[in-house]
Image: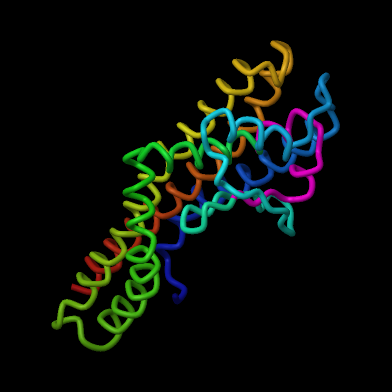
Amino acid sequence: MFYDGTYILLIPAMIFAIYAQGKVNSTFNRYLRVNSQKGYTGVEVARMILDSEGLENVVIQLTNGHLTDHYDPRKNILRLSNAVYNGTSVASLGVAAHEVGHAIQHSRGYAPLMIRNSLVPIANIGSQAAWILFLIGFIFVPELHLMEIGIIFYLSVILFHIITLPVEFNASNRAISLLESQGVLSSNEIAPAKKVLDAAALTYIASTIVAISQLFRLLLLRGRRR
């Protein structure tokens, strides 16, 4: 937005975010080189689990990018990156099963996922409007309470990040349970797959911490301006 001394509040959060991103990349790349004993590909495992859960209607597609895997609840499409779609590593299978976990959440009406999905448009608007309103209020017309309105908009972003945490943790727990119960991975392969998913979870925790730190910064700026 603009430079000021309150940026120091973001430094610890940003350092943790950089660490989390490095951790997920290094962990994924490490176990990407460890092939699973049974040799299933990510798409095979995803299809196997989906069908076993009665989700034959979910389409699996190959998508571009690195760790761009995601489930689209609007279209019932599971998109897997090439390393996951065609990969036979424990990392590939762990990520594929995690995304299937989201499809299962959607089919069963998992409450945190439903709440998160409903918050997406609100959070998108809030993330943009918050800064515009706060900046106008801070610089030009603080008496119109635009800073406070901007902060209220930003709270929708915070809520989105917070509700994302149980959604992601639950999807990972489902993934590990399914990989084990369906015999996709052996007992000694479960731990590496879990390490990959745990590392990925750090990025969501880091995003939440960054967002909360930014909120404290806005509150501090508002206090100073008043």
Residue that lies at the very extreme toward the bottom in this rendered image: 140
Which color scheme did the rendering employ for the protein?
rainbow
Residue lying furthest top in this view?
187
The magenta stretch spans which residues? 78-95
Q: Residue 202 sits in which quadrant?
A: top right
Relative to 13, say whether 64 is above or below: below
Residue 54, given in percent of the width and then of the height, sits at: 51, 33
Q: Tell me how many marks there are.
A: 0
Residue at 57% from the left image edge and 28% from the top image edge:
52
Q: Does the magenta stretch include residue 83?
A: yes
Give x and y (percent) for residue 200: 60, 39
In the picture, measured across the screen, residue 122 lies left or right of residue 205, that is left
Determine whether 5 is above or below 163 in the image: below
Location of the C terminus (image quadrant): bottom left
Give the residue drawn at x 63%, y 25%: 194
Query: Camera-side residue: 145 or 93?
Result: 93
Task: Classify residue 96 as left or right of residue 55.
Answer: right
Q: Where is residue 152 in the image (x, y as percent from the top left)?
A: 23, 64
On screen, residue 146 versus residue 154, left or right, reads left
Residue at 44%, 75% (x, y): give it. 1
Q: Is residue 112 magenta?
A: no
Give coordinates of residue 119: x percent, y percent. Answer: 33, 57
Asked whether 124 or 225 is in front, the reply is: 124
Q: Which of 192/88 is in front?
A: 88
Q: Residue at x 57, y 40 (%)?
A: 56
Quarter-wise, where is residue 40 in the image? Answer: top right
